[in-house]
Image: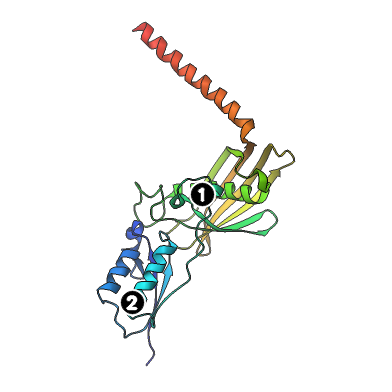
Amino acid sequence: MSISSRTVIVVGVRFKGFSSEHPDVMTISQILEELQTGMHGTEGGTIRLRPGQGLTAADWERLEAVVVRVGVAHRMHLDPFATEPLGTAEVHKRLPSNALVAALHSTEPGVFRAALRIHNDNELLLDHQTGQHVQGMVVVEAARQMFLAVTERYYVAPERRGGYYFVINSMKTTFENFLFPLAAEIEYRVTEAAVGDPTRLRFAAEIGVHQGGRRCALTEVSFTAFESELIEGKEHRRATDAVSHESRLHAGVGAGA
């Protein structure tokens, strides 16, 4: 008689709406509770655990430790956990939980790939996560982080990294398929690059998010990376003008009251 085998995908608790609809998907808290209460005995077929979205390497290490402690490591096997997200400096975020891009690499000139890595406490999930799919703003932010990271790593000289101010000229995202809290890949293709002047780098790119052999979304973006000193003065002048305009409007309202 053949021994049965099963694959279970583990996701973060933010994605319980997805896990509740699929018997082969569990949140990290669900699988830990089942293990610690003895629901997975030492007898039976093999179970392969695969990481989905909403997990960290620390979550995966804890799960592995519990599997060993309760004595089911011989039949419950964990897939390797993907690379942790990029550093916050490359994606211009302060908190590691808000970084969405991992394992960035170049595949050919002007083409780059990375893994989408969504932390359970990502800022975009804290107040809006309904249904089974990942909300579209996560895709938009992942595209933004991708063009920042690619530019910082591959187009900016090492001594100049962190010294640019990025300005989006246009950004359009077309959603083609639902994105679910499973493994996904980001593909970045440069369609235009003007890098002759190191004080002002201009790019256009297409950024696709792919999952399960399908493209979920395509973002077309054009942006300019200015040396910070070049843009900060201009930004300050524009901000001062905006404040002055607002002050004049309110002064006029008060005078006529």
Residue, disc 1:
88
Q: Quadrant of residue 33?
A: bottom left
Q: Residue at x 62, y 56 (%)?
A: 112
Spatial CA distance of label 1 from label 2 is 34 Å
Please state the horizontal and vertical placement of residue 148, each as a whole percent of the image: 58, 46
Kindly state the secondary structure of the residue where label 2 is placed. helix
Task: Give the residue at the far bottom of this rendering.
Answer: 1
Q: Residues within 10 Å of mark 2 (few under 14, many from 20)?
A: few
In the displayed structure, would residue 239 be above or below residue 73? Answer: above
Is residue 51 visible in the rendered structure shown here?
yes
In the displayed structure, would residue 222 be above or below residue 184? Answer: above
In the displayed structure, would residue 106 be above or below residue 237? Answer: below
Observer-nearest residue: 7 or 61?
Answer: 61
Residue, disc 2:
69
Q: Residue at x 69, y 36 (%)?
A: 199
Please state the horizontal and vertical placement of residue 7, each as a whole percent of the image: 40, 75
Task: Give the residue at the far left of this rendering.
Answer: 37
Q: Residue at x 63, y 51 (%)?
A: 153
Observer-nearest residue: 157 or 24?
Answer: 157
Q: Quadrant of residue 257?
A: top left
Q: Residues within 10 Å of mark 1 (few under 14, many from 20)?
A: some
Which residue type does callout 2 highlight? Arg
Is residue 21 visible in the rendered structure shown here?
no
Observer-nearest residue: 136 or 59?
Answer: 59
Q: Is residue 155 left or right of residue 185?
A: right
The label number, if any, that marks residue 225 in the structure image: none
Please state the horizontal and vertical placement of residue 113, each as a whole percent of the image: 59, 58
Kindly state the secondary structure of the residue where label 1 is placed. helix
Which residue type does callout 1 highlight? Thr
Quadrant for the N terminus, please: bottom left
Observer-nearest residue: 185 or 225?
Answer: 225
The colour scheme applied to this rendered structure is rainbow
